[in-house]
Amino acid sequence: MRKKSFVLLLSFVLLLSGFLSGCGNNEEASAGTTEDGKTVVDFWTFWGSETRRPMIEKIIKDFNESQDEIVVKHTYLPWGDIWTKNLASIAAGDPADVIINDINSVAQRAENNQAEDLSEYLGEDFKDRFYPHLWETVEYEGKPYAVPFNTDTRLLYYNKDAFKEAGLDPEKPPKTWDELEEYAKKLDKKNGDQYERVGFYPLWGSVGSDAWMVSADNGRNFIEDGEVLINTPRKVEALEWVKEWKDRIGEDTVQTFEAEFQNQQANPFISGKIAMWVNVGNNYTQIKEFKPDMNFGVAPIPAYDKDSKHWSSGGGFVAEIPKGSDNPEAAAEFIKYLTGKEAQKYWAMQNFDNVANIEGAEAAAAELEGKDQEVYQATIDNLETTLLAPTPVNYPDYQNLMNPKIDQFMMGQMEAEEALEEAQKAVEKMKR
């Protein structure tokens, strides 16, 4: 009797839960369709902050109201978790319809059959809407597997008041590495042996030794067209140059300043601890928030020499359809809207991000005024010499082999050429 009663109770619970589930989800008649026949597109992002979540949800709302065939639903997942869950959902056969993903690893997901080929959903001239260096990154074997959404670029920010104090022309920022060193020494401010202000240090801001190495090597990345280019004379020279800065101001100064930087509110450039640093364009939003009257300028990153380009490093994100999406055609329609001129213009003006759509970016720059316009236009101009670093399909883990060797050199455990030679050999062995 007890067993029979338990079975009856379980049946009732399951029936009730099914009924309640249906009541709580009246909007959807099935997993991918609403009761009134609209296709549901499940959209995953990691934008959950007080600033960005309202922005993306406004874009979604505008799209939903712009037509009557598709309903986009936003799912927020924390940074890091989103991509783990994406791969798990693809493996389980139940992925999102659209996801915001990393631009530099598109080819890897395409090769691993984790993203949909978008060729059939996009016209041949669709790519002309985007900056060429971004579109190249979303193609694999000549086909697009994502659409660029936003990107970034790095500029030299410099304190004009500090320039005046040091006897430097505030309208003439350094253009070469030699000038950068000359200016930095004049901008250093010490009290006895203690630095009160550091003119410049190449590893502070949002740039690493790898970016300086690529810049010195005329923009040649570490792996190009299947060739490993880690141990080259220019990259060795650049790595030694980075360490020379550390040796000049001293390990104690580096550690003391970096300890202070742990406090996100204590932006070292805004507080005057650093006179010049390299950072992403939307670092300007922090200046606007915490010191709106700061007298600063922006310029391209100083070039290796007067005959070199002002190379910058960049990254970004894409809108992608995971492999196995139930509604790829509807998903593609939403991606077109998300990466279209109006949505991109809105995102750029609200967030100071470099958007991928050329018309959207230029429209935003045209409407901005004053310092806002000056900084944003500088980031747009800088895209011409901005290099992305797509993860090579045949060398997916090359950075995990290269970076420890660079760290060993920076700690004085080996010479620069020795470190890069060992990294070169290790990477060459890992070719898939």
Image (cartoon, rainbow, N blue to C red):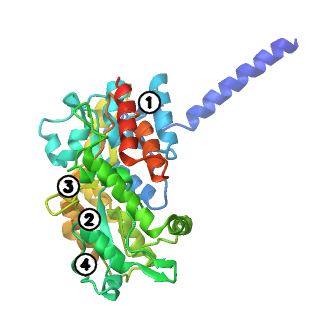
Q: Of residues 213 and 386, which is closer to you in this image?
A: 213
Instruction: Give how far apart the Cα atoms at labels 4 and 2 are.
Output: 29 Å
Type of amino acid at the residue the image marks with label 4: Gly
Residue that sits furthest to the right in the current view = 1
Q: Tell me which corner region of the image, top left, top right, bottom left or bottom right, holds residue 22.
A: top right
Q: Can residue 206 be seen?
A: no
Percent position of residue 393, x then y: 32, 29
Q: Is residue 132 visible in this depiction of the protein?
A: yes
First along the sequence among labels 4 and 1: 1
Of helix, strand and loop, which one carries label 4? Answer: helix
| Residue 370, numbered label | 4
Q: Say which element carries label 2.
A: helix
Q: Which residue is mark 3?
A: 385
Q: Residues within 10 Å of mark 1 (few under 14, many from 20)?
A: many
User: How far is mark 1 from mark 2, CA to CA?
Assistant: 48 Å
Q: Residues within 10 Å of mark 3 (few under 14, many from 20)?
A: some
Q: Which mark is residue 177?
A: 2
Q: Nearer the viewer, mark 2 or mark 3?
A: 2
Query: Which of labels 4 and 2 is toward the front?
Result: 2
For label 1, the residue is: 95
Which residue appears at 35% of the width and 50% of the height? 210
